[in-house]
Amino acid sequence: MTRVIETARRWIGTPYQHQASLRGAGCDCLGLVRGLWRDLHGHEPASIPPYSPDWSEPQGEERLWHALARLLPPGRGTPGDLLLFRMRPNAIAKHLGLLATPTTFIHALSGHGVVESPLSTPWAARIVARFDLEGAS
């Protein structure tokens, strides 16, 4: 098991809280990634401006995808990869999770908090990009 997966599993049980990023207290999917980055690197890679739950859907802008592509190398398709999901066809990609095993991923889900979920066929079909969180600096 990789360091990022071990670290992510420590976040399981953290309640869902929009825009938060504090293990045990609350986070959303981006907050989970921000917290993992801090745990691994001691700081955040960039300041995150306030964002609404719809992100940039009304504008149709892939802000999250572009930001991740600037900060992280492409994923290898292996556990430890950061997964970016499109929640509906033709919508912007706005959900994040960490591939924990070939068949599970860790993410913060509204109403559930941070959980390790099966990477079922419907979830896998929503993946639009993979990034190497461990290869980042």
Image (tube, rainbow, N blue to C red):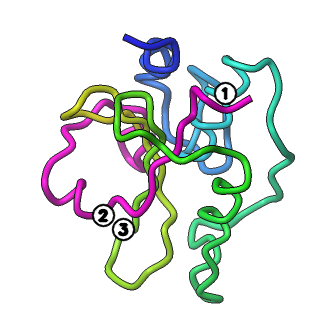
Residue matched to label 1:
22
Q: Which residue lies furthest to the right in this view?
A: 47
Mark 3 and mark 2 in contact (Cβ < 8 Å)?
Answer: yes
**For residue 8, above or below residue 119:** above
The quadrant where residue 12 appears: top left
Circle nearer the viewer, 1 or 3:
3
Circle nearer the viewer, 2 or 3:
2
Residue at image coords 40%, 46%: 109
Label 1, label 2: how many angstroms apart (C-alpha)? 27 Å
Q: Quadrant of the C terminus?
A: top right
Q: Determine whether, in the image, residue 123 is placed left or right of residue 64.
A: left
SS category of the residue bearing label 1: strand
Residue at image coords 53%, 37%: 132
Q: Give the range drawn in magenta.
A: 108-137
Relative depth, front residue between 111 and 102: 102
Q: Which amino acid does label 2 sit on?
A: Arg
Give me the disc on residue 87. Answer: 3
